Image: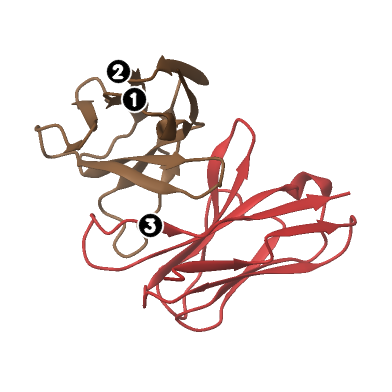
Chain colours: A brown, B red
Amino acid sequence: AQTVTQSQPEMSVQEAETVTLSCTYDTSESDYYLFWYKQPPSRQMILVIRQEAYKQQNATENRFSVNFQKAAKSFSLKISDSQLGDAAMYFCAYMAGNTGTASKLTFGTGTRLQVTL
Amino acid sequence: NAGVTQTPKFQVLKTGQSMTLQCAQDMNHNSMYWYRQDPGMGLRLIYYSASEGTTDKGEVPNGYNVSRLNKREFSLRLESAAPSQTSVYFCASRATGGWNQPQHFGDGTRLSIL
């Protein structure tokens, strides 16, 4: 079974600074996809960024980027120019590529990000 | 834009009571999912429905049943609630058509069982 590990329960960053959230995963699959979701206090789950395992190029969405190291099974999220609105729980998630229409997600335990002035 | 709608938002039950959590999506998505979120545990999949007419167990199905009533609606039932089922429950839906179709989540139901 696939597992996703987020070893940082909490992180803190000053406004306008850069922070990196760590995620590692374990899988025997070669075809899979990785995601970062944000959960603000409102409890909504918001997709931040996604990465295809077969692509070497790291995904980028505005201030959010990933460092995908396939051999190391590592998928970290970098938030640049942090804003107060970035404060939230961040979840790393894995999806196997051969599940047909099922497309089940396996989530890590989350990292709570605080943004300070 | 309704998206995924869950009802109720909050509920308190006594041990042994039954309850059905409702979920409806208006995006014409084929796949729907039920997760539970516990402190320090992330989201864990309870049941899912890859398409209308099918349901399958996820990681933590014990104590739950589901019904895919139609393409829009996917309900989760607790037949005899237990304190261990105190959690926040999320419903999600997803369109078929490629890996980059994300799951869309509802706002969650906070369920407390005394």
Badge 1 or badge 2: first in the primary sequence:
2
**Any mark on residue A18, and which?**
2
Mark 1 highlights which residue?
Answer: A82
For disc 3, the chain is: B
Q: Residue furthest front?
A: A117
User: Label 1 amino acid?
Assistant: Ser
Per the image, label 3 sits on a secondary structure element best described as loop
Nearer the camera: disc 3 or disc 2: 2
Residue at 27% in and 59% down: B101
Disc 1 residue crowd, few under 14, some 14–19, many 20+, Cα 10 Å? many
Q: Position of residue B4 (x, y in %)?
A: 48, 67
Disc 3 residue crowd, few under 14, some 14–19, many 20+, Cα 10 Å? many
Can the viewer see residue A8? Answer: no
Are marks 3 and 2 in one subunit? no
Mark 3 highlights which residue?
Answer: B103
Of B67 and A18, which appears nearest the observer?
Answer: A18
For disc 2, the chain is: A
Residue at 44% in and 26% down: A5
Q: Are marks 1 and 2 in contact (CB under 8 Å)?
A: yes
Q: Position of residue B44 (x, y in %)?
A: 54, 46
